[in-house]
Image (cartoon, grey):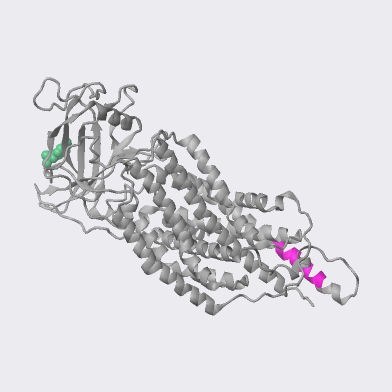
Amino acid sequence: MRSAAFWAFAASTALLSPAAAFYLPGTAPRDYLVGEPIDVFVNTLTPMLNSKLKSLISHDYYDERFHFCQPPGGPVAQPESLGSILFGDRILSSPYEIRMMENTTCQTLCRSRVPREDAKFINDRIKEDYGLNFIIDGLPSSEMKRDSKTGEIFLDAEGFNLGDDETEPDRPALNNHYDIYIQYHARDAHHFRVVGVLVYPRSVDSLVGNSEANCFDDRQLHLSETNDNELYYTYSVSFLESSVPWGLRWDSYLHVFDPKIHWFSLINSLVIVGFLVFMVAMILWRTISKDISRYNAIDLSEEVQEDYGWKLVHGEVFRQPQRPMVLSVMVGSGAHLAIMAIVTLLFALFGFLSPSNRGSLATVLLICWTLFGCVSGYVSARTYATLGGEQWKPNLVLTAILFPTIIFSFIGLLNVFLIGASASGAVPFGTILAVLLLWFLISAPLSVGGYFYGMKHGAFSSPVRVNSIPRQIPPKPWYLRTYQAAILGGILPFGAAFVELYFVLSSLFGNRAYYAFGFLFLTFTVVALTTATVTVLFTYFVLCAEEYRWHWRAFLIGGGSAFWMFAYGVWYWASRLSLGSFTSVVLYFGYLSLFSLLDFLVGGSIGYIAAHFAIRRLYSSIRVD
Ligand SMILES: *[C@@H]1O[C@H](CO)[C@@H](O)[C@H](O)[C@H]1NC(C)=O
């Protein structure tokens, strides 16, 4: 008896647990012999999400103001995927020398000189909780942590502290010594594999009175902003045996924070959406079946009775709305983005986005966006034809370029800001070119192809004729006015998503890995369902109020959650972030507006398409003479 429920639970747990998902290995395992060098690569410095996130800008490791030690001959950039570059990785070689199975203590990396002007820069970055990110044998440097809620031990790859501003808040100390622990797995007596990388930094005034670095001094190293500074960078390496085989080495990184909260939120939204779908189904079914039978009866029994509600506007609902051109382009672009999101989430869900393939999420997003260009063309063509638009050529061109242009120029503007702040998150020219090529050579032609295919399928026929003279529209209650309805309608989809949104924001802006793709996928599905039902419900109310201009209203109501998302972003900024610099604030609000715009398009498109089919269904069931 119990077993069915038990297996359902076990299956869903497997679905939602990242460790159970299999993932494609990004790199082949590498066997090291004793004494073989292990490469250490350095990535950008990123702000860490401690109690509050204080900056959004990442800095190049070899930004000259840091004065980190450079490898002889200068740092060499490592090849990276497009997605990895877009997500801000800049991976370079480093002068660290680590050899398999050779423990070292207090090795000197170099002696560095920090002039007083740059000491202030470094101290400010320490106060903003910047972290360093090393990559050793493809694994990110991490700290071992215990989840205070579940007691689980996991590796946190958020980075390790650039400095320490907690011991003495007014005098930040620079961490210039790193204790590197490499966990290895012995294949046999001679072959070893790296299965974990831990780095613990500390600050030590190793120079005092010595010509050689002394890593065991108790005093911390404070950079003076009035005098030039001299310091040593040092490191120690220890190899620790581990029983974890290579194939499972990422498992301890794939940690889902607060799984209970994810579950709680998911169940919560499932209850909401279940209730909502039931409500909509009941209301629509009961009212409509009653309405329809009464409506059809009226004509037969020649009783003169006033018509009311949505039936009155049967001669108007399929009247062409204002600006059908823009509307169809928006519906097409929204459908494009929705399909892109769904397919990417499916990829993530089934574990194809291996964490060892850095930036694979962004790469898959980009590929899906490129290939599903055809969806925007198809949907836009059919919507435009249904709305009775006749200028298909401008419509086709706008569909292929309008929203990509808006989004790319927006990102370009943010990029200019990043370059202005000499931060490293700026996308390099070659990458921009590659994305533009993807767009013009693949995505835009696919969109055109999709458009022609959509034109071949043509318009959806209207089930009822449009009257030649438009009806007067009576005044309606406040909650059915366009913007009020949009904002009200947005509450439920947003309510179903906001807990998950919190985690997504934390990992987008904080450098925190996000692996709860199972939850994210289910949340996306629930939000899409909620958006569709809420829009249908509101559109029905609008029509009952004899307001027949439903096309734009349906789009706005569906996209209404964007308003709440933006408001939530403002709250998150006020309560969870304390961004110091103007650039960070501009970046944050820039990205927030961009996400809200994308959410608006996706939600609006889902709402419009749902309302379109519901209304066709509704009016095709009544009898009109
Ligand atoms: C390296 O150091 C660790 C602990 O510091 C120790 O357990 C291990 O045996 C050492 N390995 C070698 C090869 O000396």
In this view of the protein, which residue sits in the foreground, 81 or 322? Answer: 322
In-image side of 561 versus 278 (left or right): left
- Residue 518 image position (x, y, % from top left): 44, 55
- Establish if 600 lies above or below 383: above
In this view of the protein, which residue sits in the foreground, 572 or 73? Answer: 73
Which quarter of the figure has residue 354? Answer: bottom left
- Answer whether residue 291 is magenta in the image: yes
Q: Can residue 153 be seen?
A: no
In this view of the protein, which residue sits in the foreground, 438 or 350? Answer: 438
In-image side of 423 versus 520 (left or right): left
Residue plotted at (12% across, 39% down): 103
In-image side of 526 versus 99 (left or right): right
- Establish if 490 lies above or below 315: above
Residue plotted at (32% across, 47% down): 253
Q: Residue furthest right?
A: 303
How many labels sit on residues? 0
The boundaries of the magenta stretch are 282-295
Residue plotted at (27% across, 58% down): 26
Task: Assign the magenta stretch its main secondary structure.
Answer: helix
- Residue 380 image position (x, y, % from top left): 53, 68
- Residue 268 image position (x, y, % from top left): 56, 49
In this view of the protein, which residue sits in the foreground, 370 or 173? Answer: 370
- Residue 386 image position (x, y, % from top left): 61, 72
In which of the image's four quarters is ligand 1 placed? top left
Residue plotted at (52% across, 61% down): 334
